[in-house]
Image (cartoon, rainbow, N blue to C red):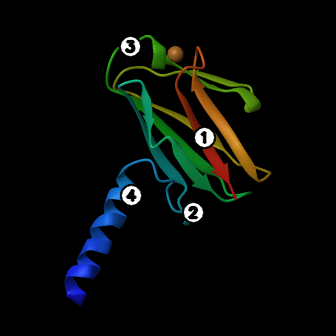
Amino acid sequence: MRVAFAAALVLMACQANESRAPLPASARSDVTIRISGGTYTPSSVQVQKGQPVRLHFTRDEKPTCGDELVFPALDIKRKVEVNKLTTVEITPQQRGELEFTCGMSMMKGKIVVQ
Ligand SMILES: [Cu+2]
């Protein structure tokens, strides 16, 4: 009974990690974000204030939508080519949320700075 309950908890934790839950705010400095089906996966990434983070964007399809990557608040615009990594390195200096979007602001993701 106890074992089954623990196993269920572990399973739930795994599922949460793989869906929309923000990544844990560990000492992670590299995050890969996949652009597919009109969404960013993960769409939310937690980082620590002052900690450099490299965001590697990868796109595995050819919609025109995801081919431009914009960080409005940081004045960053990058092209994202199919099957190539586009890396953006940032060191957030204040807590809060940093949004990133496609060229037309339809797809949205965010960096949560703690
Ligand atoms: Cu778009």
Judging by the rendered image, the residue that carries numbered circle 1 is 110
In 3D space, how far apart are the residues under numbered discs 1 and 4 (Cα atoms)?
Answer: 17 Å
First in sequence: mark 2 or mark 4?
4
Judging by the rendered image, the residue that carries numbered circle 2 is 25
How dense is the environment of label 3, judged by Cα within 10 Å: few (below 14), some, or many (20 and up)? few
Q: Amino acid at mark 4?
A: Ala
How dense is the environment of label 4, judged by Cα within 10 Å: few (below 14), some, or many (20 and up)? few
SS for dot 3: loop
Q: Give residue 89's position: percent from left, percent from top.
A: 62, 41
In 3D space, how far apart are the residues under numbered discs 2 and 3 (Cα atoms)?
Answer: 31 Å
Q: Give residue 82's position: percent from left, percent from top.
A: 36, 21
Q: Nearer the viewer, mark 1 or mark 4?
A: 4
In 3D space, how far apart are the residues under numbered discs 2 and 4 (Cα atoms)?
Answer: 15 Å
Above or below 65: residue 47: below
**Front-most of 30 and 26?**
26
First in sequence: mark 2 or mark 3?
2
In 3D space, how far apart are the residues under numbered discs 4 and 3 (Cα atoms)?
Answer: 28 Å
Q: Residue at x 38, y 49 (%)?
A: 19
Above or below 12: residue 35: above
Q: Amino acid at mark 2?
A: Ala
Q: Amino acid at mark 1?
A: Lys
Judging by the rendered image, the residue that carries numbered circle 3 is 63
Numbered circle sitting on residue 16: 4
Q: Nearer the viewer, mark 2 or mark 4?
A: 4
Above or below 31: residue 6: below
First in sequence: mark 1 or mark 2?
2
Q: Residue at x 21, y 86 (%)?
A: 3
Q: Give residue 21's position: percent from left, percent from top.
A: 47, 53
Q: Nearer the viewer, mark 4 or mark 3?
A: 4
